[in-house]
Amino acid sequence: MLVIVSGIGAVAYFQSTLTALLVEGTVGQAFWRKRMKKEIDALEGHVVVAGIGSTGRYVVEELHATGTPFVVIDRSVEHLARLREELGGTMLYVHGDATEDHTLLTAGVDRASGVIAALTTDKDNLFVTLSARSINPRARIVSKVIEAEATPKMARAGANATVSPNQIGGRRMASELVRPEVVEFLDQMLRDKDQNLRLEEILVPDGCPYVGKMLRDVPIRR
């Protein structure tokens, strides 16, 4: 009886361990990576985000909040796994170096509508900008800059726009001091998880009958 009970226990332990290995272990991870690659390959017109450090994670949170399809690239698998879990397990990502062309291609940069270079150094962001522009001449590229001197270099490399977190942070601090109510109003727009309020941009095409008219004369609500 002791042998039988021990045997049944050993088999049950082996089965539970094997199941955990298949679902959560190496096999499960391989299955998830294959499925994620298939989903990335099916994307078109998405945004590629290079880097999820102190700046990039907020970029990803905003894209997720507004329902914009995106793919993240980062060297840290821990950061990728943590942020993916925070976003409900739906974030698509590529683990690798965003300054390398094959990593950008894996993320579908050739089919992307936009690229955000949010790596730690200006040099790395410059590499991403150069590579992305050479692969996809149509994409809109926004690059993070640390030093003010890097802004014209990013523009020459192909960036459509540059953003300095230091500059924006300084202006925000001044605004908090001189116009706190306005800042609070804008913050409420961003924090409202139920309504997702944003200032949106709408392109009016050539030949539209509403070109040149006052807003009050345009049936916007209809």
Image: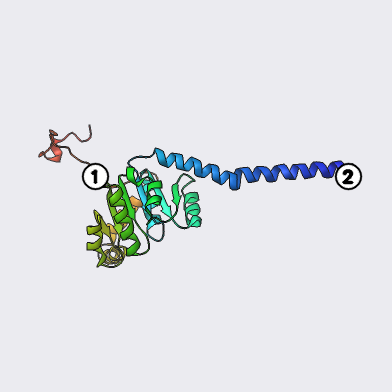
Q: Where residue 207 sits in the image (x, y, percent)?
A: 12, 34
Residue under circle 1?
A: 201
Comparing 4 with 124, the one in front is 124
> What residue do we see at 39% from left, 50% from top?
102
Q: Nearer the viewer, residue 7 or 130?
A: 130
- Residue 139 shows up from this direction: yes
Amino acid at circle 2: Leu
Earlier in the chain: of badge 2 and badge 1, it is: 2
Q: What x and y, as percent, mark residue 111?
A: 33, 42
Q: Is residue 82 left or right of residue 46?
A: right
Question: So how many labels did they put on this image?
Answer: 2
In this view, the residue in front, 80 or 97, is: 97
Q: Residue at x 37, y 63 (%)?
A: 120
Mark 2 or 1, which is nearer the eye?
2
Between the residue at mark 2 and the residue at mark 1, the CA separation in whole angstroms equals 74 Å
As drawn, 185 above or below 120: above
Q: Position of residue 146 (x, y in %)?
A: 31, 66
**Which colouring convention does the figure follow?**
rainbow
Q: Which mark is residue 2?
A: 2
